[in-house]
Amino acid sequence: MSRKKKFTDTTIHELSVADNNDKDDCVGDINMDEKNNIQRTHRFEVDHLKIFFEQEMGAREVDYGETMAGIVRQFAAELSEEETDTPFYMVNLSHFARQYLRWNHYLSRIRPFYAVKSNPNGFIIRVLNELGAGFDCASVEELDVVRDQCGSNFDCASNIIYAHPCKPVSQIHRFRNAGVQFTVVDNKDELKKISVYWPEAKVLLRLRPDDAHSLNPLSSKFGASEHDCIEMLRLGRKLNIDLIGCTFHVGSRCCDAQIYAESIRMARRIFDVACSNEFGYKFQLLDIGGGFMGHHSEEPTLPKVAALINNTLNSLFPENEGVRLMSEPGRYFSSSGMTLVCRIIGRRIVTQSRLNQEILSSPHSLSPYSGDDTDSDANSIEQDEDDAVGGVCDDQPLPALAPLPAFSWAQQTYVTTPKIMWMSDKKNIYYINDGIYGTFNAIIFDQKTFITHYLRMSSPTEDNEKDISGKNEKHFKSVIFGPTCDSLDCVAHAIDLPVLNNGDILWFPDVGSYTCSSASNFNGFKTTKYVLFWNK
Amino acid sequence: MSRKKKFTDTTIHELSVADNNDKDDCVGDINMDEKNNIQRTHRFEVDHLKIFFEQEMGAREVDYGETMAGIVRQFAAELSEEETDTPFYMVNLSHFARQYLRWNHYLSRIRPFYAVKSNPNGFIIRVLNELGAGFDCASVEELDVVRDQCGSNFDCASNIIYAHPCKPVSQIHRFRNAGVQFTVVDNKDELKKISVYWPEAKVLLRLRPDDAHSLNPLSSKFGASEHDCIEMLRLGRKLNIDLIGCTFHVGSRCCDAQIYAESIRMARRIFDVACSNEFGYKFQLLDIGGGFMGHHSEEPTLPKVAALINNTLNSLFPENEGVRLMSEPGRYFSSSGMTLVCRIIGRRIVTQSRLNQEILSSPHSLSPYSGDDTDSDANSIEQDEDDAVGGVCDDQPLPALAPLPAFSWAQQTYVTTPKIMWMSDKKNIYYINDGIYGTFNAIIFDQKTFITHYLRMSSPTEDNEKDISGKNEKHFKSVIFGPTCDSLDCVAHAIDLPVLNNGDILWFPDVGSYTCSSASNFNGFKTTKYVLFWNK
């Protein structure tokens, strides 16, 4: 099946399923067409990082051609018994390196400053630092993790931008003391704050582009209009602030590459005003922000966006003008570099054959189910669904369940709320060990669609019915719940899966961005285990 | 204004404002009517805990009559300069104690096991342990925090229930090794798991009540029907499992107290079947779960719910039968015991007078605003709103902003997306230091309505216009954003506030449950500071 993700308003709680033999799912995380194309031109080799990956970071090499399903199986098989029901992330370090090399290939004039918020784990920061990226930090916690990971020789002045337009004073102190020099501002109150608490800062004006075509627009929260910019240029002069350029953010996952071009034009206008005689600034830095897709197959692809950006830059900010260029990609680096591996830790199976089998083998046959259900076609879950409410609403009370006069209540409840009572009854239910408060918070906060793969760690049982052809396992509507006690913690409301067992694996690729970074440990559950690998 | 909260489907991102002089907002968190009533009958004294609160927990005593606004001001004034822009929680330890005493008064037969998930902080666990509550733990992390807080003499066997119906095997080992003996089960797979990994466990069957009237129903995720229970009784016999009773959960914030009565009747039926000759169990424990409101003024109040529960229990589970009774309240204890104190760390003010003032004082008067806006009535934000789009769509380009042929784009953008561009422009915007990824995650995950109070830490400035009477400050439609770089991190989209300054306080009472417990530290922001107090 296609791995292309759809991002629409209706994708909340929508998942696709891929089985464990999906050969398209290569570790390289590039679809075949593009991969062949890239291989013809350049391979983005990372072999030279072998020692760094293996000796410094403890990653293991896997074969380039190995499917992700194969790697999941391999790693899962090696877990100790105690670890088997602990969810974990598989991290492909070479993905981060390849994305960096790819960036440099397509956007060679623009130095990327990795947006730490998308995934603040040390491994990605170390790889990107090793290769020469800078870092976009929005808080002291992000500053600290970058400094911790990058060692004592790390130069905050040239490698970090404090890219938050609204800064707590206490955090300004910390960034300033760390030697950071670049920051951004989008309003006059903030300029006044800078003039008092960080007068030597090199400040970029954050513009407000038209980001209506981005999946996570940011313009309602940040960014100054052209008019605001003029006001800030004036105030900046008065306060003697070292304004040195412009930045903008087209919004996360920008679907229309033209917005980059339009925003660069807007920046050019501000550059010209700032450098005019009226203001006399020497603008020298343009930051084109983020908004790049995380997966190679998502449109617009990096090559397409890059072509447009390069053309616009070469026209408006030609190299000989000497304006330095930077950017703040986050998910571009982090998204496809991580895979989540979960286990089924509980289940509630309602396939018809199982129901029949249990009722037929039961000496206690006075259940309200007994009339209809034993006659049902064992292969027809649909028929079962049609019959279900009738079965429950059967007027024959179960003697053993009716010791009290109040028994009529039970029937009444079933009748008045049959949907609530039966919607879940008619689906197989699985409970896995990560959920909506953990990695899957991205369903809510990042409108992310997760692709579900399953991997059987047990033999199929009698529950695993075949379809009409007799070859393939029959799939049933299933619910996937997360591990917490909250019913909102539902990962998928209706997904087609064969009958799986406790201990079987569900795994989810491309979970590197805005997942672990915004996960809580509600109810004491959080995925904290990371397994590192790389490939050539 | 009334502090009564409304919980409806439409309350997401709805906030109410109360100013800082709301005298109804007593520390006791009991409305006046009920408080007078309670004081007449019993005062739920906590004076005897003075040494425990102050010497063991480091809490400070505040006067009983002091308003929460007064306490917020008092604590905020004492912060060091570095701490002023750090958000913090104010924790009223005596609230937890009063709630415990209140529970014992109204529901004396039922021992509460505090649902740790609602707020796993050590301070609430210690207070409730000191008074004699047990604990409902759903994960090893919750088990560990309870054991850490309750000291080496703490008896897990009698004081903890592992109340999760679907348990990872590794966590079963940990609970078993800690000496816990009570747990719950709602499906046959889980019974098999118990028989292999925890054969000596004392197991409660979790029933599925009709929770359609609860604000957070749980029945779609957990709970067995009466039919399922019979199946489990049979399987339990076969596997020699020590089934000892029933539990149910009516859903979080149960609006219809009758559900407790109906669920107790359902439990009675299962008790009778289990203890019948066919199965021969000796059922001895009934756990009525949670679902109790967190605030005294919310309906149904504890006295009302308790009356119904007590009547039903006395009828169906009379004291002389010897069945032990327990419950799992969470928000009942934790909700009203915490207040969040935030600071405004950034702002973007668009009141008319300010706009006029800046434009009039500006030598650079070629802005597209200049035609309409300088004529506007300085006191009329409404007029400003009406004129705004017209002003921007003015056909006069700003020469300084039009050095490129592409300028026509800017106009076009404003015209095609005026709503997006102007909705935020027309409101005052405040950025505070906690948000939707932090405490306010409860807006999404707990359908919580937050009450907003403001507290001025600076003198009102010329921005603070008066209303027609000349007495009260004029309020403006305002947006409150959280501290992260994400535009989704919006606490309130449209709330009426006067003009506030950076450094002023917004504070929010009743934030003790399902707030910090499910907060992430996305982008490096999380409220982690707690200030403890108590009152007599």
Image (cartoon, coloured by chain):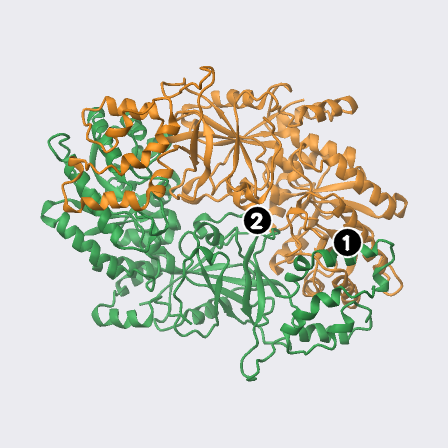
Chain colours: A green, B orange
**Residue B10 at x, y percent in the picture:** 55, 43
The part of the image, by quadrant, that contains residue A80 is: bottom right
Q: Nearer the viewer, residue A265 or A536?
A: A265
> Which residue type does callout 2 highlight?
Gly
> Dividing the image into 4 quarters, which one contains the N terminus of chain B?
top right
Query: Tag 2's secondary structure?
Result: helix
Q: CA distance from mark 1 to mark 2?
A: 25 Å
Q: Which residue is mark 2?
A: A524
Give me the residue at 15% from left, 33% from top: A281
> Which residue type does callout 1 highlight?
Cys
**Residue B264 at x, y percent in the picture:** 79, 49
Give me the residue at 19% from left, 30% from top: B366
Q: Which residue is mark 1?
A: B246
| Residue A153 seen by the camera | no
In the picture shown, does residue A2 fall above or below B116?
A: below
- In the picture, measured across the screen, residue A224 lies left or right of residue B516, that is left
Q: Nearer the viewer, mark 1 or mark 2?
A: 1
Q: Nearer the viewer, residue A239 or A89?
A: A239
**Residue B394 at x, y percent in the picture:** 24, 36
Give me the residue at 52% from left, 53% from top: A436
| Residue A120 seen by the camera | yes
